[in-house]
Image (cartoon, rainbow, N blue to C red):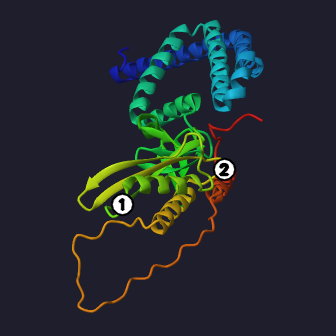
Amino acid sequence: MAIDPAVAAKAVEHSTLYLRFATALDLMEAKLVKLVASLPLLLVAILIVLFSMWFGSLVARRMRVLTRIARSNPYMDGLLRGIVRGLIILAGVLVALDLLGATSLVGAVLGSAGVVGLVLGFAFKDIAENYVAGVLLSLRRPFAPGDHVRIDSHEGKVVSLTSRATVLMTMDGNHLQLPNSLVFKSVLLNFSRNPRRRFEFETNVGTQASWHDAMDAGLAALVSVDGVLADPAPNVLIKGLADSGATLQFLAWIDQTRNDLGKVRSEAMRRVRKTLREAGILPPDPVQKVMLLRDAGEQEHAPETSLSRDTSVDHALDAQVGRAREIEDGKDLLDAPP
């Protein structure tokens, strides 16, 4: 009896599907048996990873080298402890993968991590640059909290140093955040590192009096100002000459921990001007004169008081910097350990 070709084809198809299904079941059964057989190894691998996490934390906490670093730089202490802990955990993960026979997977993961790291490095170049600059600044410590600094064209007192930016409080009381990369690459002038600081000012004298007498009188007045240091001694120089007179430059030093630069300079200018005027040493006459037909009388000058003005240190901005540091978010890289 002849078999219908369509029926034969359907029977072959059903047989093929059955064989495929049976093969898939056998494969799943084999994988399941293999998984059950490898459960002890998998459990050991998990225990290795957990042990590496515990051991990494223990080593990071108890390393004496890191403890010494923490005394001088708490930020670097946390960073190095995290690196040590991460390396130990990574070693544990690699051992666990090797135990499971996934060595090829380790190479693939490390290669992929390298590519991803390269891509992220280009994508977050500025963030990484600021972070690295913050670490280097915390190591070099070119300034401390409260220092009066000028960075590039920006001036103020240091509030804090974070992983991203250096925070200043300007002389107007405003918060200014400068990227750490800019701070690291810019010219930095620290006015507070040396407690002694020099100030200078100029005044003009005419030709009616001796310039030597003017220099002596002005220097004596400068020495008498409260806050002016005797060592280094104040000085006066002739800075410029003109047909109508000369320009005298006065220079003196103060101790910034006891006196305010602006106040001492202001008082010194007032004292020198008062002394020169009392000695009859006047500024040069203007180039153009207006001659009046009638005598208007000699012009009266307001009398100068001999009382001294306050030259103590102005701590108003320092108090604001202190309050700003108390509310500053994040860990300050300039914080000293307790």
| For residue 50, side relative to residue 247 (left or right) | right
Residue 65 picture location, percent across and down: 71, 16
Q: Amino acid at mark 1?
A: Asn
| For residue 77, side relative to residue 177 (left or right) | right
Quadrant holding the C terminus: top right
Q: Is residue 197 above or below residue 305?
A: above
Query: Which image quadrant for residue 61?
Result: top right
Quadrant holding the N terminus: top left
Residue 240 picture location, percent across and down: 30, 51
Q: Is residue 20 above or below residue 187?
A: above
Residue 308 visible here = yes
Q: Nearer the viewer, mark 2 or mark 1?
A: 1
| For residue 161, side relative to residue 199 (left or right) | right
Give the residue at x 76% y 20%. 54
Residue at image mark 1: 204
Give the residue at x 64% y 23%. 80
Q: Earlier in the sequence, mark 2 or mark 1?
A: 1
Residue 66: mark: none
- What is the total number of numbered labels drawn onto the structure image? 2
Q: Residues within 10 Å of mark 2 (few under 14, many from 20)?
A: few
Q: Amino acid at mark 2?
A: Arg
| 66 or 199: nearer the viewer | 199
Residue at image mark 2: 258
| For residue 99, side relative to residue 185 (left or right) | right
Residue 70 picture location, percent across and down: 71, 26
Residue 201 visible here = no
Residue 148 picture location, percent across and down: 55, 47
Q: CA distance from mark 2 to mark 1?
A: 30 Å
